[in-house]
Amino acid sequence: MEENGRYSPRDQDLLRLSVQRFEEMVKHKDQYFFDVDTLLNISDHFTGNGDFNKALHACDYALSIHPKSTDCMIKKAQILAFNGNPEKGLKLLRLAEDIAPFDPELYILRGRILDIMKQYDEAIQCYKEALPYTEQKGMLYNEIAFTYQIINQYDQSIHYYKKALKELPEDEQLLEEITTCFTVTSKFDKGIEYLKSIIDNNPYSHAAWYNLGEIYTFMLLHEKAIDAYGYAIAIKSDYCDAYFSIGQAYSSTEEYKLAIENFELALKHNGIESVTYFEIADCYEKIEENELARTNYKKAVGAHPGLSQAWYGIGVTYEYEENFIEAIHYFNKALKIDDTNGEYHFAVADSYYQINQYSKAEESYEKAVEYCPEDVDIWYAYLNFLFECGHSDKAIEQCRRALNEHTDNSELFYRLACYLYEAGKIKEAYLQLEDALDLDFDSYLIIFDIIPSLQNDMVVLNLVEQKRNHA
């Protein structure tokens, strides 16, 4: 009997003896008799230990003494399919189907193998063919729904998740999946209607209340989301996911102290420490409680040293205190984990700039725009750095590069005019300024922020007045 796991202590002892006997047989190249169930359990044992060759050997031996056992064929096909040989798995299933054409397990496994092979329509057909032959219709509806979800046929997916939930109304994973389908397709009203119908039938369904909160969160209706999560907690007081989601909702409405309270309750009820400490730290950072932010970021990396965002967060707290050496130390720890993160390189660059290590700053700015070219603010910072360091020609080069990424950004047009002017390319600068004024006249004042002396350049002033009159 199964007990606190897959096998009872007695069954575990029997399995251990069977495995030893099987391995002894293999070692001595002998042949012992085992019944089908014992050999299947031996195969499962080897699979659980990651020894797929031995698992296949057990299946092959089972088929040598029980050649008509479809259970053995299914087991072998399963091992083959999920370890890189789906075609061989399908071939074996065809043999099994000749022996037991109405065995639903054959259809189900064939469907799963076809899923692996990305033959989704055929997989769905297999699952549907199995429906008349099995009592586990909820599980099959789930397989069908999930496969439709993979190929983005969300209406069909929702239809079959509903069928699955009629068979398995307590399955929280199914509720989560159908809610995902409603949110991905922005069918929020239908999702709310469906979840409320479940609540009407079972007001104490904490999972239904929670998923209702999730839909409200996607709609940015944070107060309604908090109410729904609150009902989930009223039903299940140790519901850590609900506490965490309330924390996120309060964080979204900038009620950071309430957010922290709920994140701490999530921790109390066994929430994921690394992520929750990170969220708490982020809230403390937002309310400028720098030391508490740093403490919680450190707790986050203590729970999960690979959480690069938390190492970065520690660096940010030092940056706020203008302790740039420490900031760089922690930013670099984040980069060791995620060295293609443009935001991290940007932070390092700014800190190097603050301590006058210009060559390292330039190198980091270059990596920042390489990995995050879509962030125009990083380009602005890089261009400011180059210009303030007197590298007008390099600023021109990088500004043109930025314009390749942000072709309609008027500020970059104005910046390029300024950099050309500073580099002594006056005529080209005037032409560039004309283009900028034509693109976005109202933003022209930026040129006086970059080069204040342009307020005394009559050509510039005349161009502005000319364009103003034609704006």
Image (spheres, rainbow, N blue to C red):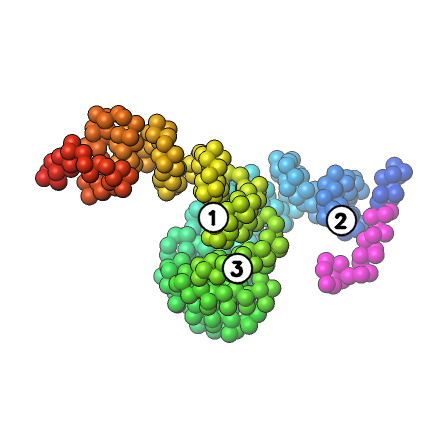
Measured as percent of width and height from the top left, residue 396 is found at: 33, 29
Q: Residue at x 15, y 36 (%)?
A: 461
User: Separation of disc 3 and disc 2 at Cα?
Assistant: 50 Å
- Residue at 62% in and 37% down: 86
Name the N-terminal-most of marks 3 and 2: 2
**Count of all numbered marks drawn on residues in the image:** 3
Q: Eyeballing the image, is 419 above or below 126?
A: above
User: Which numbered dot is residue 45?
Assistant: 2
Q: Residues within 10 Å of mark 2 (few under 14, many from 20)?
A: some
In what element is the residue under mark 2?
A: helix
Using the image as rendered, state which of residue 378 and residue 111 is in the foreground. Answer: 378
Cβ–Cβ below 8 Å for labels 3 and 1? no
In space, the residues marked 3 and 1 are separated at their CA atoms by 49 Å
Residue at 55% over, 42% down: 332
Q: Is residue 14 magenta?
A: yes
User: Which quadrant, please, contains the N terminus?
Assistant: bottom right
Q: Position of residue 31 (x, y in %)?
A: 87, 40
Q: Which residue is mark 3?
A: 291
Residue 220 in the figure: left or right of residue 230: left
Task: From the image, state whether disc 3 or disc 2 is nearer to you.
Answer: 3
Q: Which residues are magenta?
A: 1-21
